[in-house]
């Protein structure tokens, strides 16, 4: 052992000084607990901010809720359409539902026409199935959704989209009301033929389909005039629509932003 080495010194330094005031130790423990509480509060505030931001995002941009069986878009007349215009958009939506139901009834009527032995039954059934598959979604996207967005955003281009595609749909409605054989329509002509055949199932279902075509066609024509008057009163013009298209681009008209 070296003569300079202290034989009474410990080879291990003390972690704490035994002569320290125990109050200081308690203060350090309290400070550590306070720091832990502060971190927890900060984490809680961060989570609350994230939840608030998420809620605000849903409020502004909505949450897909339509159709209910496979939500693709957000649709809420109460939340997005001005109160004064809600009854009109509600009626248009109801007429679209009548259209969707009429397309299905029309297909069933064409099945009955085929079963009755009509020579045009195959063509009628094939066309009616095509109408259900294509007209149902296209009518929603091409004339109902544009006027929904038109009243929500009050932008001219939506109105012109509605007038264009809604006008074609009115012509299609007249075509379906007439019910020319082999066109896929169980309208007037087909229904009268079913009554004279006679083929009672085809006649009954054809009558329901014809009434459906008339109801949705007349209703849409009535509201078409109202929307046209509103569009003129709001001062929408083709030039304004072109300016909106140049400013926002075509993509903006397929989004809710």
Image (cartoon, rainbow, N blue to C red):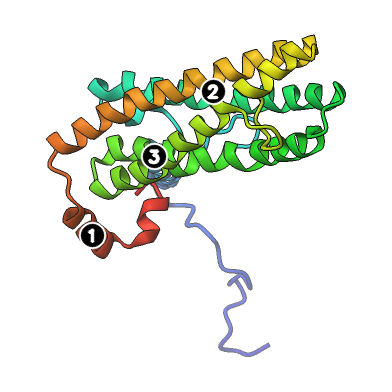
Q: Nearer the viewer, mark 3 or mark 1?
A: 3
> What residue is at 45 percent from the left and 44 percent from the top?
142
- Residue at mark 1: 242
Residue 51 visible to an observer of this rendering: no
Mark identifier at residue 76: none
* Front in this rendered view, residue 91 or 116: 116
Q: Is residue 119 left or right of residue 156?
A: right
Q: Which of the marked residues, 1 or 2, is nearer the chain's N terminus?
A: 2
What is the distance, in whole Å, between disc 1 and disc 2 at their CAs?
34 Å
Label 3 close to label 1 by CB (< 8 Å): no
Mark identifier at residue 213: 2
* Front in this rendered view, residue 109 or 246: 109
Question: Quadrant of the rendered structure where residue 167 is?
Answer: top left
**Please, which residue is most extreme toward the front here?**
196
- Residue at mark 3: 167
Q: Is the residue 230 above or below the residue 127 in the image?
A: above
Q: Is residue 83 left or right of residue 90?
A: left
């Amino acid at each position: 052992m070296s003569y300079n080495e202290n034989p009474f010194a410990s080879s291990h330094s003390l972690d704490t000084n035994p002569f320290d005031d125990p109050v200081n130790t308690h203060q350090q423990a309290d400070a550590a607990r306070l720091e832990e509480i502060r971190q927890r509060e900060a984490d809680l505030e961060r989570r609350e901010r994230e939840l608030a931001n998420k809620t605000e995002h849903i409020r502004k941009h909505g949450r897909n809720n339509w159709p209910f069986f496979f939500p693709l878009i957000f649709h809420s007349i109460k939340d997005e359409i001005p109160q004064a215009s809600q009854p009109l958009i509600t009626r248009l939506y109801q007429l679209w539902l009548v259209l969707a139901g009429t397309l299905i009834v029309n297909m069933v009527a064409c099945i009955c026409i085929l079963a009755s032995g009509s020579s045009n039954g195959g063509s009628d059934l094939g066309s009616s199935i095509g109408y259900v598959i294509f007209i149902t979604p296209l009518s929603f996207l091409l004339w109902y959704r544009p006027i929904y967005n038109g009243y929500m955003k009050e932008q001219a281009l939506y109105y012109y989209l509605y007038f264009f595609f809604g006008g074609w749909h009115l012509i299609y409605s007249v075509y379906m009301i007439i019910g020319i054989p082999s066109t896929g329509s169980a309208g007037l002509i087909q229904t009268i033929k079913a009554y004279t055949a006679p083929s009672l199932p085809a006649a009954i279902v054809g009558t329901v389909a014809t009434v459906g075509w008339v109801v949705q066609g007349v209703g849409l024509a009535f509201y078409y005039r109202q929307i046209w008057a509103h569009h003129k009163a709001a001062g929408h013009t083709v030039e304004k629509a072109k300016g909106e298209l140049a400013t926002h681009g075509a993509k903006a008209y397929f989004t809710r932003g």
